[in-house]
Amino acid sequence: MLSVIRVHLPSEVPIVGCELTPYVLLRRPDKTATTDDVPESSPLEGHFLKYRWYRVQSDKKVAICSVHPSREATLQCLGCIKTKVPVTKSYHCSTKCFTDAWQHHRVLHERAAAEGNDEEEELLRLNSSGSVSSILSTVSSLTNGSSSSVYPSAITQKTGAGGETFVEVGRSKTYTPMADDVGHVLKFECVVVNAETKQNVGHSCTILTSRVIPAPSPSPRRMIPVSGTVDSNGRPMSMGSFTVLSYNILADAYASSEIYSYCPTWALSWTYRRQNLLREIVKYHADIVCLQEVQSDHFDEFFAPELDKHGYQALFKRKTNEVFVGNTNTIDGCATFYRRDRFSHVKKYEVEFNKAAQSLTEALIPVPQKKIALNRLVKDNVALIVVLEAKFGNQAADIPGKRQLLCVANTHVNISHELKDVKLWQVHTLLKGLEKIAASADIPMLVCGDFNTVPASAPHSLLAVGKVDPMHPDLMVDPLGILRPHTKLTHQLPLVSAYSSFARMGGSLTAEQQRKRMDPSSNEPLFTNCTRDFIGTLDYIFYTADTLTVESLLELLDEESLRKDTALPSPEWSSDHIALLAEFRCMPKTRR
């Protein structure tokens, strides 16, 4: 007979908006084990599985720490209440938690004061002995709300002990916690049912979650006008302009707890990160979205269908798999999305650097060195180039009867620090391909992605300056001779980094704040990647300055935007990279 062997949850912390799907191990009648579902519509030898989810409600109310949402709060910042900061931000689990978070937390007070809530400084609720007093007696009126259920009383089961009430909230294997669940434990129940009698067979298997927490929300990032204007929500107002987002989202295959041990396991789980990333991406309202490290299965099963609901058409180029070992469904690649109401698809080019490596070795590398050369050059990296046609007008650039085309390149360059020659060769190969497209059509260009190269490196110099100094130290690493002669390391595209526009802004306070987050020697952000082992800039949006102009940019993060001692990913930010977003306008082509 069908029976349940074991039930457990993939994540120890349930989060509002993130699906919970328990792992249920079954024993079939033939004694084999399986994790396949057995629904009522397809019973197995007269039996099926019945699922129930309950919210466990009790008289005890708890508040959740705003910094460590898996912990209960023990103190509250009264300064937040006085300055009308959202109450959920006022709770902390310990005095150490509060003091460690102070550099970030005080920004909330400063913003509230700037909006007219000028109140006294932060207060801690301490009793006369100096210990932190409990605030649980006040939490119920501040955070968790009424304990009354929105579900019919007919499906409410009361227990005799502890005053707990079990409120049925779901009847399927998967459940997505809601705002009403915050602060409560959830109970999952699984039982075998006789398909004919509809009676339970044997004992039910149950499991309790920890308390449901709200989805952590990072401080919003505003669009900063460079030459254009934005509305009250920080969105571009320029007529005929368009926005482009570039974001390495950190593939689940790379998001191991060994590498990112500082990130809570629940915040590192894909079920949590995918929802948090989707919320962030959708919030930016970009017309074109360039994502890197998108796994094939996640593109097909999540990003393409979810972004389709928001009006995006999807294109994808998976990395090649000559080096990769493992499940090919988890190979990542570059995904480009565009809003169907703003653009139409004209053409797509796929760049496989492995193929370019094959051609290079055939043409330049002596036979005895070909295998060594391919081992060094074949790294599975790709680029996706998309030509789009704008559906909107732009008075500054409009020529009657002329189509407004746009070429968008999305790439992820090899990560290895030792392979400086390979990085430079990949960037040079991509630029030469873009030059061919430019030669065949008068078309504005964007080059986006994770280039895994820092400002002032040889690849960055090639992109931003159009050439590499023959004395550049990166050129010393060239065991195959693929970079010689160095005079060939040039291109004619008038590329400029979008974020360098912050360096050219006027003397406003906003401009000064953004310049503090820039490297003055390179006019690039201080960082776009922030882990415990590395902090620096690897991601860029380049544009052809003779055909495009920057209107506004998404503000950069600074150290105060990240909590003290916090690296990425974190509960608030679900990638180790930050998103870059730029607003552009097409303009009549000018000579360089």
Image (cartoon, grey):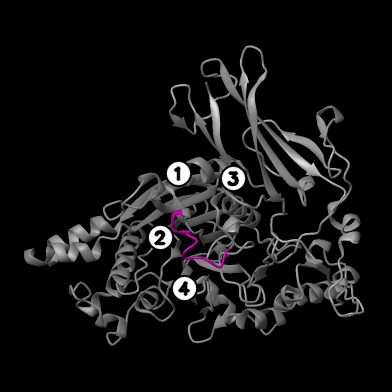
Residue 348 falls within the magenta-colored stretch:
no
Vertical side of 68 occupied by 102: above or below: below
Q: Amino acid at mark 3?
A: Leu
Q: Which residues are magenta?
A: 253-263
Can you tell which of label 1 and label 2 is closer to the viewer?
A: 1
Q: Is residue 543 above or below residue 16?
A: below
The residue pinned by badge 2 equals 411
Q: For the residues labelled 1 and 3, say whether their Cβ atoms are less than 8 Å apart.
A: no
Quarter location, residue 361: bottom left
Q: CA distance from mark 4 to mark 1?
A: 34 Å
> Counting other residues with Cα less than 10 Å from the Cα at mark 4, is it few (<14), some (14-19), or many (20 or more)?
many
Residue under label 4, please give it. 496
Between circles 4 and 1, the one closer to the viewer is 1
Q: CA distance from mark 3 to mark 4?
A: 48 Å
On the question of residue 568 being in view, the answer is yes
Q: Residues within 10 Å of mark 2 (few under 14, many from 20)?
A: many
Q: Which residue is mark 3?
A: 9
In the image, 357: left or right of 572?
left
Counting from the top left corner in percent of width and height, residue 28 is at: 48, 25
Relative to 277, does residue 232 appear above or below in the rendering? below
